[in-house]
Image (spheres, coloured by chain):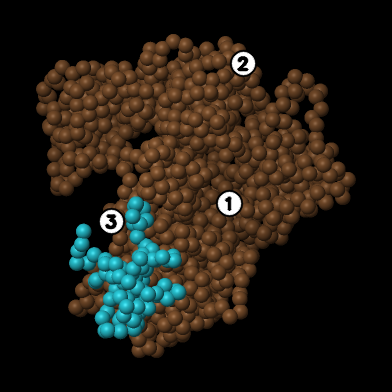
Chain colours: A brown, B cyan
Amino acid sequence: MAPRARPGRPGYAELHCHSAYSFLDGASLPEELALRAAELGYPALALTDHDGVWGAMEHAQACSALGVRPIVGAELAVRPPPSPGRAEREPGAGAGVPGRGRGEPAGTGSGAAGAAPLHVTLLVESRAGWRNLCRLITEAHAGTRWPGEGGPRASPTAPSLPLAALAERAEGLVCLSGCAGAGALVRGGEQVGRSLLAAFGRERFRVELQRPLWRHDRARNRALAHLAERLGVPCVATGDAHFHHPRRAQLQDALVAVRHGITLDESEPLRRGNSASCLASPEEMARRFADHPEALAESAALAERLRFDLTRDLGYRYPGAEDAEADRALAEICRSRLEHRYRARRERREAARRLEEELRVIRSLGLSGFFLLHFDILELAREVAAEVRGPGSARGLLPPGRGRGSSVSSIVCYLTGLSHVDPVRNALFLGRFLNEEATEMPDIDLDFPRDIRERLIVRVHERYGRERSALVAAFACYQSRGATRDLGKALGLPPGEIERVARAVDLHDRPGSVAEDIAAAIGPGRARSPRWRALAQLAREAWGLPRHVSQHPGGMVLSTRPLVELCPVQPAAMEGRQLVQWDKDSCADAGFLKIDLLGLGMLSAVERCVEEIARARGERIDLSRIPLDDPATYAAIQAAETTGAFQIESRAQMQMLPRTRPESLDDLTVQVALVRPGPIQGGAVHPYLERKARLREDPSYQVPYEHPSLEPILRDTLGAIVFQEQVIQVAMALAGFSAGEAEGLRRAMSRKRSEEAILGYRERFIAGALRRGVERAVAERVFEQVRGFSGFGFPKAHAAAFGLLAYQSTWLRVHYGPEFLCSLLNEQPMGFYPPDSLVHEAQRRGIEVLPPDVNRSAAECSVTERLAVRIGLGYVTGLGEDAARRICAERERAGPYASLEDLASRACLGRDALERLAWAGACEPFGSDRRAHLWRAGVAAPPAAQPRRAASSSRQLSLPLPLPPAPGLPELGGWERVATDYASTGITLGPHPMELIRPELGPGLVRTDALPRLAHGARVELAGMVVARQRPATARGVVFMLLEDEAGVVNVIVAPSVYRRHRLAVRTAAFLRIAGKLERRGAVINLVARTLEALATPDALRAQVHHIEPPAARETGRAGAEGQGGRGAAAAAGRGSPASPGASAGDPRGRRAAAAGAGLADLAAVAPRPHSFGRRR
Amino acid sequence: MTGVYWPRPVRVRASGAGAPLAVGGIAVEAVREEWLVEDRWWTPSPLRRRYFEVVLADGRCLVVFREPAEGPRPRWFEQRG
């Protein structure tokens, strides 16, 4: 849509506008602002976010698409030079300019020496200006995270830079004097004005007038206009827009309160105070600036002058692009490796042909340098892997990482070591990765074990220089749950109720459902109050807005020119790392070369497992040489005994495995690709399952194909479209698309809001198919399959790499169960199941799991001599890695601990650490009574320091004096023990909670092990602990849950109507009682729920909790153990009896003691949180 | 409840655009400032006021506001400060 330019309208373009990338200040996305600007008929729109250009590329793209000319810039905080007698100024004190100082971020800037920072608006006029803006922003952010010594700051300081820095980098930039609240002239007066004039000159400095409809607007603007006259520069009118539409004003108010960590009631002076900061029409701006028409005209004139276009003028080149020798160097590497790898193999001729063809395409696209760069990084990874793994490690046999994604299909990638799947032998199709019509850089994603990746990122920074490499940014965006928490707090709603609502909110649900969640959680009556209604409204408006910047999981950008001249770079939270200010989409739009160095938990787990096997059994496993046709492994896969295995452990995969019964790596390749949104929505799953079953019964069964031309493409997947490149191949074979056209179709399908583009392709697809003699009905049907698939599927090459890892992990699970469990526990969080479920499943397979023990556990979980898994001390919540390692090191040095006091004094443990160990049962070598240990811990070690006391008081060491015996305390009961286990380690090893609860539940319930004996359609009722909840977008509102009891696990299906009736129970209950119908398909059993009920607390088990400490001490978090005094509340243990002398002396013990006496409702609070509505990776 | 700064109802004749022309029967000579306050929207009593600082024909300088800020039948108040 082009802006509606009407003759006779006042000319105006907005030159000062904040998007939501002015985090917690702007309240609209760049797209929303661009769309509104087009509606209002703006010829141009500038984006000037605070201290950054995070949204600049998004803005440029959105504006260009709508016919609005994008102008980029930023509003920077600058520190005025300290001058004698210039104490901290009040806003407006500068030049007799009335100002209010409201509504602006209150950054003080590092080293601001008390003077409030001044805001200036910088707009880019030329490429040199962009370069300077990037350098200025980079400088403003330097030091906001890492002060140099003492490690990174927990939260960054506000970015700012000295005023003098502007003069050095003024070329190509236009400077406006800043906003009404904190502008350079409003706060700094004529002196600062003269400095800016000297820096930018008369041509590129303007005095900014704003009309936010605050009191004193006119007086301020009159004073500023006089000042402009004295300086001899024109005034320019700006709107300081913070949102695109007045309805976002309330959200903007709330975001200001969130930013300051206070409530709306408390934040009046900091808020903007009205809705005037929306993008206003040119007519409205003309009305507001009736006193200053020349300023309004100047806005339009200046906008006309600013012609720098980020989508065109960036000038990026990737490293290696200028290397004239790159073609020859790449060809030499590949050819010599081809000789080596394919020597005396029948695929040699085909491999050589394919290599030459690929090299030709790479040369024609000028990408040889790009491949050499990846090769170089992989060589670097090899060095890093050797360092991380250490000499002689069993892991040394493994490659440092492996490619994923479509790059695996390239023989060049195979030969340079980027992939480990032979594309010739596996008949992988190259087109998706590389074709001659490619307009974007191909994707190469590399998976590494986490520890290697951590080190590699720093090494890449070192190799290419900090100026030329950085991580890609990511933005944490508001979803319903986070918005409920943040905005509920800003509204001053009760924290307990906010949390109840937040837990009831589906993390990824549509934003409009918060109102229903509020009503469900606190009742419809309360939900009608203005504050709760406001919360529902605000959460809906906030959905999708970026909240803060974070780090992409592994994307790195490399450049030949200094990156800091292309995009600002800022320090990341982790020391030694830095980010460009753009996310992956903006980087792709800029054409940046992005290399994904991803950490894959399962690769780390597999490496750990190999190492643990070597340690526990002295066996050296080379995973590249294990048999790929192991019957025991396939038997486990076919029986869906795959908990913990890569990819095929998920609920959906386990449902499918007994039906597909994979028998080879090829089958597994299809299997991992099948459970993806693409094949599911494209309708591929059921035809594949059915045809696979029929083929098994009747090997002569003829698989039906929509058209004979599709048979060679879809043969491996039995006529269904399962892999991403099959979309391309189908379009080429059926409709005669070129490789580039087909790739264009695939891209169009994978983007949002591309309906028009897809329709265009549809017509071409059907016309092309008709030309080839395909019937219209067939062409339309195939197109619908292609369209259903969209972009959300794996390329075959990627699936092959994942399928291999799925096999390897299952092989380890089958043959080295204890070591595999141990490695999974040490790599958490990862995979589909929480540690507690992994442990229970292993116990059911006969693997012995032992509790943490100060005399036997290592810091991490380990496998014992008799092949049991011992939980590591690191699993004790809040103990901290340092304390765990200290306990182990001291034990190695001087032998086992004899008593609690011995432990306290030799391992230098504070009371808090001792209590956590006692409560987790890790002190049971000194006796079995946890409560007695807790009592004695209170005497053995000094209390942790109060937060405000000198740090030295927490360093008083314990003396190994004999402790008085504990008074007679009741031993922990079964329930109390379970609750204590969950509160302290998240794993319970004794009786399953359901075993303890079962006597309370009455007759008539079945256990999961009885289900295989029941008939299809049988009415059953059972109870269990919720292990996982999922509400996949592809399932049209159906919720799936995994319910675990003492005998096993069952999959529960909750239909949308049942979900609506039992929403809160489904979303939040830790233990459920479910009645429903048994559904059986072959060996696959499901329970289709009819009613659900959260299990309630038996009255006899209610805890009596007494808070003795002041509330402030009770509410401090649950972070690291030592020196973190005053955490818990003092409380008496179950049934009102005091737990230890510490308790009566006002000591932290409340949470655990309360848990010990808790019943089911309390258990729900400490039971391991199931993986809800999605999976962690 | 009354107080020194508590708004007092006042009779105002306003233009079609909503600007005051006369306050308490005395003509407005000039509008010195005009501003908008929108607050407390999350409470049962939200605030939406358009303020004017005016100079009257008799030389007095006053602050008046209309509530609500827009709409056909506003109520007018005078407020000191």
Disc nearest the viewer among 1 and 3: 3
Question: The residue marked by circle 2 belongs to what chain?
Answer: A
Residue at the image point whose x is 65% and y is 36% from the top: A680
CB-based contact (under 8 Å), mark 1 and mark 3? no
Residue at the image point whose x is 52% and y is 12% from the top: A1010
Residue placed under numbered mark 2 in the picture:
A1016
Task: Please tell me which of labels 1 and 3 falls first in the chain.
Answer: 3
**To which quarter of the image does residue A906 belong?**
top left
Residue at the image point whose x is 65% and y is 40% from the top: A678
Residue placed under numbered mark 1 in the picture:
A375
Height in image: A58 above or below A1112? below
Height in image: A1080 above or below A90? above
Height in image: A94 above or below A310? below
Which of the two residues, A145 or A1046, is positioned nearer the viewer here? A1046
Residue placed under numbered mark 3 in the picture:
A266
> Which residue, as the protein is rendered here, is positioned at the far front?
B25
Q: Residues within 10 Å of mark 3 (few under 14, many from 20)?
A: some
Amino acid type indicated by mark 1: Phe
Which of the two residues, A643 or A242, is positioned nearer the viewer here? A242
